[in-house]
Image: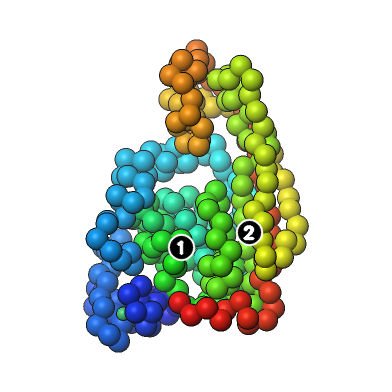
């Protein structure tokens, strides 16, 4: 496993591979999984208890494999085509987008997620990826290791982003657009609302620009309609009566919409003064 910028999550020391594990100089040891990723979560709680369950990870993989979100995947890879260097996909999930980025020539793609099953599935998607299980609040990589970072639908932690990016490194943030899944909302709610599309406030990351991606998809079965709804944050806030409204539809047209925002880390090294 390529572990040159990974750090021991216990002591912060450099890690080196010995047989099927990674070890630091202080003797902390992390076994490589047979799929080739490493679990760098510390503490007694296993990743699958703190992150998504196995079932949720497989559900997400199976849904994404149907291709409804291919427009987002393709726009993301088009954005990175021709770029080179090391990229970190934060909260990479089951790797649908990470694997596509990892297929681009010139990019060395790393990714991590809190849920071990997500990382395991990502490793199976593309063996060229370097993957680990870790927490977004404390990413076990050395300071300034990455030229690029991607953050799709995940919490925004500016301090860690600044720490892991090189001076002048770039972050691509993706959030749901105003009209994302509006057709689905119209089918469920009497008064559907649009997403607010607000970008997170930043202190030192400089916003270079935004770009909107809009597409229209047709969900092809009741199962797919239920699946996309289940993956939304508002699923759990919707009453059973409103959820049941979706059962009337055999297919469903909806817009999907995403906002890309690109940020640049400061050119000075001050951002990297925090030692992991
Ligand atoms: Zn250590």
Q: Quadrant of ligand 1?
A: bottom left
How far from the left and from the top, in percent, is residue 74?
61, 49
User: Mark 2 or mark 1, which is nearer the start of the sequence?
Assistant: 1
Q: Secondary structure at mark 2?
A: strand
In the picture of the structure, the residue carrying the numbered disc 1 is: 137
- Image x and y of residue 232, in percent: 50, 35
Q: Is mark 2 within 8 Å of ligand 1?
A: no
108 w.r.t. 115: above or below:
below
Please give left or right for residue 97 compared with residue 55 in the image: right
Residue under the point 53% across and 67% down: 160
How far across and how far down the image is residue 10, in percent?
32, 75
Quadrant of the image containing the N terminus = bottom left
Look at the image and tell me in which quarter the C terminus lies: bottom left
SS at circle 1: loop
* Residue extending furthest toward the bottom: 25
Q: Position of residue 127 (x, y in %)?
A: 39, 62
Q: Residue at x 25, y 70 (%)?
A: 31
1 vs 2, front mark: 1
Query: What is the number of the mark on residue 30?
Result: none
Give the side of residue 94 with respect to residue 166, left or right: left
Measured Cα–Cα span from mark 1 to mark 2: 18 Å
The structure's colour scheme is: rainbow
Q: Residue at x 52, y 51 (%)?
A: 154
- The residue where tag 2 is placed is 172
Q: Mark 2 Cα within 10 Å, few/some/many (few <14, many 20+)?
A: many
Of residue 203 and residue 47, the one placed in the foreground of this image is 203
């Amino acid at each position: 496993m390529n572990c040159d910028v990974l750090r021991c999550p216990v002591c912060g020391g450099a890690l080196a591979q010995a047989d099927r594990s990674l070890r630091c100089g202080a003797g902390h040891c992390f076994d490589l999984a047979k799929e080739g990723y490493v679990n760098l979560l510390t503490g007694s709680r296993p990743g699958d208890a703190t992150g998504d369950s196995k079932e949720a990870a497989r559900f997400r993989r199976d849904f994404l494999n149907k291709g409804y979100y291919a427009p987002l995947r393709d726009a993301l890879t088009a954005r990175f085509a021709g770029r080179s260097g090391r990229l970190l996909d934060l909260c990479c999930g089951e790797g649908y987008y990470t694997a596509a980025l990892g297929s681009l020539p010139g990019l060395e793609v790393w990714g991590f997620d809190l849920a071990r099953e997500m990382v395991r599935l990502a490793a199976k998607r593309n063996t060229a990826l370097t993957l680990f299980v870790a927490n977004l609040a404390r990413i076990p990589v050395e300071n300034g290791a990455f030229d690029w970072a991607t953050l799709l639908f995940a919490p925004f932690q500016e301090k860690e982003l600044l720490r892991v990016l090189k001076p002048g490194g770039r972050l691509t943030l993706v959030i749901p657009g105003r009209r994302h899944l509006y057709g689905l909302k119209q089918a469920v709610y009497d008064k559907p609302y649009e997403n607010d599309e607000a970008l997170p406030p930043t202190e030192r990351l400089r916003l270079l620009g935004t770009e909107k991606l809009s597409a229209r998809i047709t969900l092809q079965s009741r199962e797919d309609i239920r699946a996309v709804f289940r993956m939304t944050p508002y699923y759990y806030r919707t009453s059973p009566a409103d959820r049941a409204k979706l059962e009337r539809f055999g297919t469903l047209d909806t817009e999907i919409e995403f906002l890309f925002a690109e940020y640049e880390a400061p050119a000075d090294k001050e951002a990297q003064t925090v030692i992991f």
